[in-house]
Image (cartoon, rainbow, N blue to C red):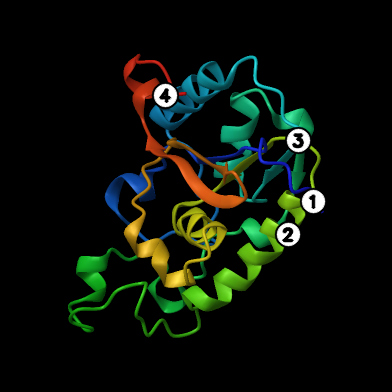
């Protein structure tokens, strides 16, 4: 296992889709990027230009893979089903407001989500990704989805899976996790500076 304090792991949420733009819960539905989502993805690539990654991992869904490819890492990408978005079950394609017409106060973090996944189930998938990442000899880049990456961030710092509720994550945002000495930390979270022409924080 690699215990290097210098390892950084970069998370990229996929670019905008029509469903993410409207707030629809999107898990297994393979919704493509919008033109704006593709533009965002090119800016991700510009922000990461010159960075070397020992390993690049991606969800198999096209919105993540296309973001990865446009950003310039498609040839290096390895598919991991554990990076699929949380399964929203019967709420797939619905907004929170629509769900709450029949389930007041419903949240993806508290459920219930019939025929879907709980945060804890997604957390177990994320733990497998973390184990692989920590065994890598160098920095790792991951392209995936909003709730999956929020849970991945929570589990990186040993929070329970539902701790992801505290970690907002915009489309095409860049986040970095790593170590402070031996302690896993969130080094950078939900940065959108590159999308507005600003420098990516160090």
Mark positioned earlier in the residue sequence (4 or 2): 2
Q: Secondary structure at mark 4?
A: loop
Name the secondary structure under disc 1: loop
Classify residue 142 as left or right of residue 15. right
Residue at label 2? 131
Find the distance from the CA under tag 3 to the CA under tag 1.
Answer: 9 Å
Q: Circle 3 sits on which residue? A: 138
Circle 4 Cα neighbour tier, 10 Å, few/some/many (<14 / 14–19 / ≥20): few
Is 133 on the left-hand or right-hand side of 145? right
Q: Are marks 2 and 3 in contact (CB under 8 Å)?
A: no
Gap in angstroms between the C-alphas marked 2 and 3: 14 Å
User: Which of these two is toward me, 61 or 4?
Assistant: 4
Q: CA distance from mark 2 to mark 1?
A: 6 Å
Label placed on residue 201: 4
Question: How far apart are labels 1 and 4 at the CA level?
Answer: 26 Å
Q: Are marks 2 and 1 in contact (CB under 8 Å)?
A: yes
Of the numbered discs 2 and 3, the one sitting upstream in the chain is: 2
User: Which residue has dot 1 on it?
Assistant: 135
Q: Earlier in the sequence, mark 1 or mark 4?
A: 1
Instruction: Indicate the position of residue 36 as horizontal and vertical percent values.
Output: 39, 28
Q: Is residue 125 above or below residue 200?
A: below
Q: Secondary structure at mark 2?
A: helix
Q: CA distance from mark 3 to mark 4?
A: 20 Å
């Amino acid at each position: 296992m690699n215990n290097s304090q210098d390892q950084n792991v970069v998370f990229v949420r996929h670019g905008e889709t029509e469903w993410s733009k409207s707030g629809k819960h999107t898990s297994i539905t393979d919704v493509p990027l919008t033109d704006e989502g593709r533009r965002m993805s090119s800016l991700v690539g510009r922000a990461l230009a010159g960075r070397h990654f020992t390993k690049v991992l991606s969800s198999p869904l096209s919105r993540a893979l296309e973001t990865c490819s446009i950003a310039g890492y498609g040839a290096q990408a390895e598919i991991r089903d554990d990076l699929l978005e949380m399964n929203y079950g019967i709420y797939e394609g619905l907004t929170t407001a629509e769900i709450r017409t029949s389930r007041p106060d419903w949240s993806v973090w508290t459920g219930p989500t019939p025929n879907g996944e709980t945060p804890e189930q997604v957390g177990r998938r994320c733990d497998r990704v973390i184990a692989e990442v920590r065994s890598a000899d160098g920095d790792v880049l991951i392209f995936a989805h909003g709730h999956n990456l929020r849970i991945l961030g929570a589990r990186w710092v040993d929070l329970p899976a539902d701790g992801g509720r505290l970690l907002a994550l915009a489309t095409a945002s860049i986040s970095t996790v790593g170590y402070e000495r031996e302690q896993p930390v969130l080094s950078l979270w939900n940065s959108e500076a590159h999308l507005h022409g600003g420098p990516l924080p160090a």
